[in-house]
Image: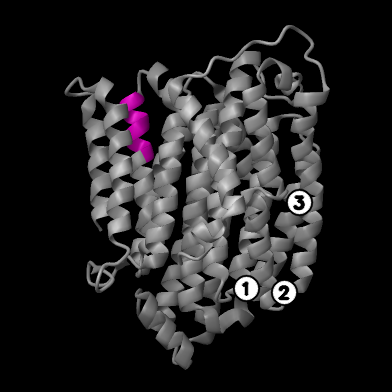
């Protein structure tokens, strides 16, 4: 609870800073506050008893604490990535406040124990992101992405609310534990109502993680939004969504796998195939990362499909490795696209000679996202596949392995462009600020360290 209070306070400060002419303090205060939020969250790890708040509507158990730490730490890295963009923006207070409020919603999504709090968390997370996607007001693509995201998001929220209403009608409760007790005992008012509610909630949650067939918003929104905002959406938003998704189904509907497991199986398979195959045909690195983000949602769904004892740790490790790799990749993409005026694969030509440090970091990020050892992404996929195999889902693992092999092609396209192709013109030497240097060092170190010592994360939950 202290984490949510601190994040809300930081968001309130950033929002009011403009009024009191404290704009220059927004960035350092929020950055320090986020580091403090990591410490406050860690302090909840050994809380005795595990804190239950608002009449058991929020519970900070180990699951919530670990995912909160990952998301807050990711936002710290994001703040380093976005420093230049925020410094150059006249709306720095607005942007930072929206991002922090969105993070507060993300934390609420991983610690909810009541469907009411799940809905509030999703809306607190989503509404600021709708605005941030269109924050580049002079860019028609940004405006389009915001509108498309808002309309599709509202549509998906309708499915989620309809599902919550049906589940309430069947179980007469919003509390996760009480719902699970009713479902386990078979005492629901209507089996049909419960099953329909589960499917409708599944649709709402699948949209949030941008899995097929509810992925159509993702490429256009990621492409149109400012790159640093896209980095936020592809990491923290996706992490919160899959964590909330897993908590809901692992607690409430584990005995109803006959209703939803085949649906998740089909969605995961389609997501893996479509995301990876479509990414191959992209000429824009940003759009390629958007489609690869869709494919990564498919890998995450394997952990949900398994619902094995190891699934929590597998999903946690996967989201951590994916978030760090994505932040590093989007950081380099931001530099290159600003220097060359576009985000095509050709804009990376010769980067290995003109900016070897940037090329090295991008290589590490691409290798991790592709799942090449010894990077963190390799063990992320290994643990996800192991969870799925232990639950008997060998068929979907085979599809996932094939998808991983396909992904090597488009990730390595970036590496080939950097080291084996010459730039058409004299390449620009990209100057890095101190904040960006810190970010690249931390991201690279984390990708390698988590690949060598995966137990740093996987054994904590």
**187 vs 7: above or below:** below
The reply to whether callout 2 and callout 3 are in contact (CB within 8 Å) is no
- The residue under the point 30% across, 47% down is 37
Q: Which mark is residue 306?
A: 1
Image-quadrant location for residue 303: bottom right
Q: Position of residue 227 (x, y in %)?
A: 55, 29
Q: Which mark is residue 393?
A: 2
Q: Which mark is residue 250?
A: none
- The residue under the point 35% across, 23% down is 91
- The residue under the point 30% across, 28% down is 28
Q: Point out the stretch of residues depicted in magenta.
A: 92-99
- The answer for how far apart the CA atoms under marks 2 and 3 are is 20 Å
The disc, 3 or 1, on the residue closer to the chain's N-terminal end is 3
Please tell me how crowded label 1 is: few (under 14), some (14-19), or many (20+) other residues with Cα within 10 Å.
Answer: many
Residue, disc 3:
274
Does residue 14 appear left or right of residue 340 in this picture? left
Callout 1: helix, strand or loop?
A: helix
- The answer for how far apart the CA atoms under marks 3 and 1 are is 21 Å
The reply to whether callout 1 and callout 2 are in contact (CB within 8 Å) is yes
Residue 412, visible in the rendered structure = yes
Please tell me how crowded label 3 is: few (under 14), some (14-19), or many (20+) other residues with Cα within 10 Å.
Answer: many
The answer to whether residue 97 is magenta is yes
The disc, 1 or 2, on the residue closer to the chain's N-terminal end is 1
């Amino acid at each position: 609870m202290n984490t949510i209070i601190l994040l809300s306070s930081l968001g309130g400060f950033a929002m009011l800073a403009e009024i009191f002419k404290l704009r220059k303090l927004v960035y350092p205060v929020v950055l320090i506050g986020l580091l403090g939020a990591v410490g406050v969250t860690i302090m909840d790890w050994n809380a005795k008893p595990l804190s239950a708040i608002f009449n058991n509507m929020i519970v900070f158990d180990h699951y919530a604490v670990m995912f909160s730490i990952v998301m807050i730490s990711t936002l710290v890295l994001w703040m380093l990535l976005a420093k230049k963009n925020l410094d150059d923006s006249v709306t720095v207070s607005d942007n930072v406040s929206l991002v922090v409020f969105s993070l507060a919603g993300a934390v609420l999504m991983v610690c909810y124990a009541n469907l009411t709090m799940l809905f509030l968390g999703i809306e607190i997370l989503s509404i600021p992101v709708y605005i941030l996607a269109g924050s580049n007001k002079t860019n028609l693509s940004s405006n389009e992405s915001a509108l498309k995201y808002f309309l599709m998001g509202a549509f998906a929220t309708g499915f989620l609310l309809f599902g919550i209403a049906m589940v309430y009608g069947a179980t007469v409760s919003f509390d996760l534990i009480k719902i699970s007790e009713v479902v386990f005992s078979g005492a629901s008012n209507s089996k049909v109502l419960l099953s329909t509610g589960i499917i409708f909630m599944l649709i709402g949650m699948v949209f949030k993680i941008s899995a097929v067939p509810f992925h159509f918003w993702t490429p256009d929104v990621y492409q149109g939004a400012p790159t640093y905002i896209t980095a936020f959406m592809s990491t923290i938003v996706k992490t919160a969504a899959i964590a909330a998704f897993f908590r809901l189904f692992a607690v409430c509907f584990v005995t109803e796998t006959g209703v939803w497991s085949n649906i998740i199986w089909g969605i995961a398979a389609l997501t893996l195939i479509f995301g990876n195959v479509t990414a191959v045909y992209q000429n824009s690195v940003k759009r390629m990362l958007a489609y690869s983000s869709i494919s990564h949602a498919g890998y995450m769904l394997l952990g949900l499909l398994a619902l094995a004892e190891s699934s929590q740790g597998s999903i946690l490790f996967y989201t951590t490795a994916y978030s760090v790799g994505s932040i590093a990749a989007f950081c380099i993409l931001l530099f290159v696209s600003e220097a060359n005026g576009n985000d095509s694969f050709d804009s990376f030509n010769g980067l290995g000679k003109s900016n070897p440090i940037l090329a090295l970091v991008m290589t590490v990020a691409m290798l991790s996202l592709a799942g090449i050892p010894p990077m963190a992404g390799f063990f992320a996929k290994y643990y996800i596949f192991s969870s799925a195999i232990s639950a008997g889902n060998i068929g979907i693992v085979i599809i996932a392995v094939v998808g991983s092999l396909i992904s090597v092609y488009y990730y390595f396209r970036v590496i080939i462009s950097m080291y084996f192709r010459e730039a058409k013109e004299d390449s620009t030497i990209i100057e890095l600020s101190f904040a960006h240097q810190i970010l690249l060092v931390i991201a690279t170190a984390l990708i390698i360290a988590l690949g060598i010592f995966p137990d740093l994360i996987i054994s904590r939950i």
